[in-house]
Image (cartoon, rainbow, N blue to C red):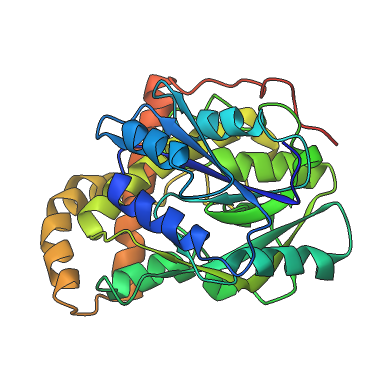
């Protein structure tokens, strides 16, 4: 399918918010793009709803696909097999784009003036519909999920900012099946791809005008669980790319000295701290950072013990 831009979206059991995301894409200030949605084996009726929506042509240019549950990386690879050229714009299924989202991604590439750049946009919380606690502000700005607080508009940012919840780049750069199947859990398959592409000369430029809003209420308990998965994925990343060990862009591959005692105490405190954060009582950045670091290194240890996420090479490699 050849269009100037293809929006690629993987989804799993999030039909209500997926509908909001697709509605927002339907209201974009340009319609010169197509949308490819891959249902990653949902069990909540998402696939049947997507089939109906596509068949009714309520959204021109909507193409839907289904696969067994194999993760978001495999789902994105599935979608990319149906895109021949142009730009690919990755977005999360719980990320609601603002009206000029697509136009601003196109503009970001015009400003870049080169075919070897990716554009990463800004994703805020959906503040009108969810309570944004100090913890959520921190994970969006300080790098625990996104590091927007450290980015400057128009500047080239590191591969760790290859955020596929809001990122576009030329299709030909991606090659065949670019997301590595070694990542069985949440996180890092996009950063790992960003690293390989950056080694081949790709630059990632921050264009905050390409803005969207993340509708995903979370508390410290759920983020703690997510950070454990991030730790497991980090272990996989370093097994794939041992040259990254010691990189200032990543957490140290060895835990801090307090971790031995902390991993026995901190998990028990998480429900209490989570309740405090939900009340809007500000926990210090130092406390939150230590709690999330504990979760990260617990996950990293799990990766070391199980070895389930073994090294592999992405099928077909990545085109230069």
Residue 245 visible in the displayed image:
no
Quadrant where the image shows the N terminus: top right
Q: Please indicate whether residue 143 sits to the left or right of residue 218 in the image.
A: right
Q: Residue at x 38, y 23 (%)?
A: 305
Q: Is residue 155 above or below residue 261?
A: below
Please state which of residues 267 and 36 is positioned toward the viewer in this rendering: 36
Please state which of residues 35 and 151 is positioned toward the viewer in this rendering: 35
Position of residue 192 measured from the top left corner of the image (x, y, whole percent):
62, 40
Position of residue 137 measured from the top left corner of the image (x, y, whole percent):
37, 73
Q: Which residue is drawn at 58% across and 43% down?
A: 190
Q: Residue at x 53, y 75 (%)?
A: 149
Q: In this view, does 16 lie above or below 129?
A: above
Residue 281 in which image quadrant: bottom left
Q: Residue furthest front?
A: 56
Position of residue 132 measured from the top left corner of the image (x, y, whole percent):
29, 74
Q: Please indicate whether residue 302 sits to the left or right of residue 251 in the image.
A: left
Please state which of residues 15 and 275 is positioned toward the viewer in this rendering: 15
Count of picture labels = 0
Q: Please indicate whether residue 104 sits to the left or right of residue 76 in the image.
A: right
Residue 133 in which image quadrant: bottom left
């Amino acid at each position: 399918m050849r269009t100037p831009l293809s929006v690629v979206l993987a989804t799993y059991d999030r039909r209500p918010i997926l509908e909001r995301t697709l509605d927002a894409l339907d209201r974009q200030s340009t319609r010169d793009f197509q949308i490819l949605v891959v249902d990653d084996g949902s069990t909540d009726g998402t696939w049947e709803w997507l089939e109906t929506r596509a068949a009714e042509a309520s959204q021109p240019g909507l193409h839907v696909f289904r696969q067994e549950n194999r993760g978001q990386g495999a789902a994105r690879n599935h979608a990319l097999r149906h895109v021949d050229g142009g730009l690919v714009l990755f977005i999360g299924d719980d990320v609601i784009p603002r009206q000029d989202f697509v136009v601003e991604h196109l503009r970001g590439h015009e400003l870049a003036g080169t075919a070897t750049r990716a554009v990463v946009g800004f994703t805020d919380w959906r503040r009108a519909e969810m309570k944004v606690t100090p913890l959520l502000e921190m994970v969006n700005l300080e790098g625990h999920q996104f590091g927007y607080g450290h980015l400057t508009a128009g500047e080239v940012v590191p591969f760790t900012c290859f955020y596929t919840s809001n990122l576009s780049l030329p299709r030909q750069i991606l090659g065949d099946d670019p997301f590595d199947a070694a990542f069985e859990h949440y996180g890092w398959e996009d950063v790992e791809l960003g690293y390989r592409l950056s080694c081949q000369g790709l630059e990632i430029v921050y264009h905050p005008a390409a803005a969207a809003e993340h509708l995903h209420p979370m508390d410290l308990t759920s983020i703690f669980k997510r950070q454990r998965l991030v730790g497991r994925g980090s272990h996989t990343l370093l097994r794939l790319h041992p040259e990254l060990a010691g990189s200032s862009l990543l957490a140290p591959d060895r835990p801090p000295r307090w971790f031995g005692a902390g991993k026995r105490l901190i998990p028990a405190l998480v429900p209490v701290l989570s309740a405090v954060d939900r009340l809007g009582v500000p926990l210090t950045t130092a406390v939150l950072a230590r709690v999330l670091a504990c979760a990260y290194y617990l996950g990293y240890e799990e990766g070391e013990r199980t070895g389930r996420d073994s090294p592999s090479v992405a099928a077909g490699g990545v085109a230069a």
